[in-house]
Image (cartoon, rainbow, N blue to C red):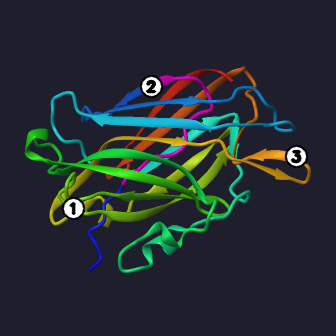
Amino acid sequence: MRSIRVLAVVALAALGPVAYATAQSSSTTVFTVGGTVSVHGGTKARPKPGGLSFRFDVSDPSGNQTPPVQTYSIMYEGGRLNTALIPGCKADAINAPATPTTDVCPKGSQIGAGRLNALIGSAGQPVSTASTCAATLQLFNGGRGHATLFVSSELATCPIALRQAIDMQYVTSGDMAGLKFTVPELLRHQVGLDITVTHADATLRTIVVRKRGRKVGYIESTGCKDATRDLVVTFTDETGASFPAKASVGKC
């Protein structure tokens, strides 16, 4: 039987040093983001390959479970992903078997790994009334213009054994680039309960491929106009209200 599936979210961060930023909604939900990178500098003509790590936390200072987030947009300045550089593994392919599995993914398609924590309960109620869930993350290149996130958990650390792949679209806007996706209803609510991710972190390793005589990175730094790199993560709830968390993440 196919396991009940739940959303886990993580994605790319800005290509800059350690940084944290918070945004607060009218319902007192606080969103905090941060990231680190292994490379600085570069231009569009001469980009520099590197790796990065990313994390975010969602909380309510009053101690209640926060509402589910419906759409995530994680945008960074002065960087890019070369999604056609390495083999891809689509979310649909992972989810196709009765028990979703990454065994279908081609060699060389994994780009990183991480973990997440979630609450399964009722939004607005005390966190103490919810069940906690810890899961592991695997990230894959999703093919041209996409990345794939696979979340899995065991009954020892979560009320439900989860196995779910999520498609993320690579988007650009001016000097900003990143990943954006909307969470389906099925992955925000199960059996009358709300599913809210409270923490996620991941590390994307440095991947370099020699192409036409030069080294090309899966993740590349291309520089910033003001020499300071910005990270903007926008969390959109089920009412359509958006809460951006922006940080200047140091030297570009």
| 191 relative to 149, above or below | below
Q: Which residue is mark 1?
A: 160
Q: Would you say residue 69 is visible in this rendering?
A: no
Residue type marked 3: Arg
| Mark 2 or 1, closer to the camera | 1
Q: What residue lies at 52% left-to-right and 25% top-to-bottom?
A: 247
Magenta highlight on residue 10: yes
Q: Quadrant of the C terminus?
A: top right
| Horizontal and vertical percent position of residue 2 | 30, 76
Magenta highlight on residue 115: no
Which is more N-terminal, label 1 or label 2? 2
| Other-residue count near label 3 (Cα within 10 Å), few / some / many at <14 / 14–19 / ≥20 | few
Q: Quadrant of the N terminus?
A: bottom left
Q: Nearer the viewer, residue 63 or 35?
A: 35
| Horizontal and vertical percent position of residue 97 | 42, 79
| Mark 2 or 3, closer to the camera | 3
Residue 120 horizontal side relative to residue 107, left or right: left
Q: Which residue is mark 2?
A: 21
Q: What residue lies at 79% left-to-right and 46% top-to-bottom?
A: 216
Residue type marked 2: Ala
Q: Secondary structure at mark 3?
A: strand
| Other-residue count near label 2 (Cα within 10 Å), few / some / many at <14 / 14–19 / ≥20 | some
Residue type marked 1: Ile
| Horizontal and vertical percent position of residue 38 | 63, 30
In magenta, the rendered stretch is 8-19
Residue 68 horizontal side relative to residue 46, left or right: left
Q: Disc 2 to disc 1, how far (Cα)?
A: 32 Å
Is the C-beta separation of discs 3 and 1 under 8 Å? no
Q: What residue lies at 87% left-to-right and 38% top-to-bottom?
A: 45
| 130 relative to 109, above or below | above
Extreme residue toward the left, this view? 129
The image's mark for residue 214 is 3
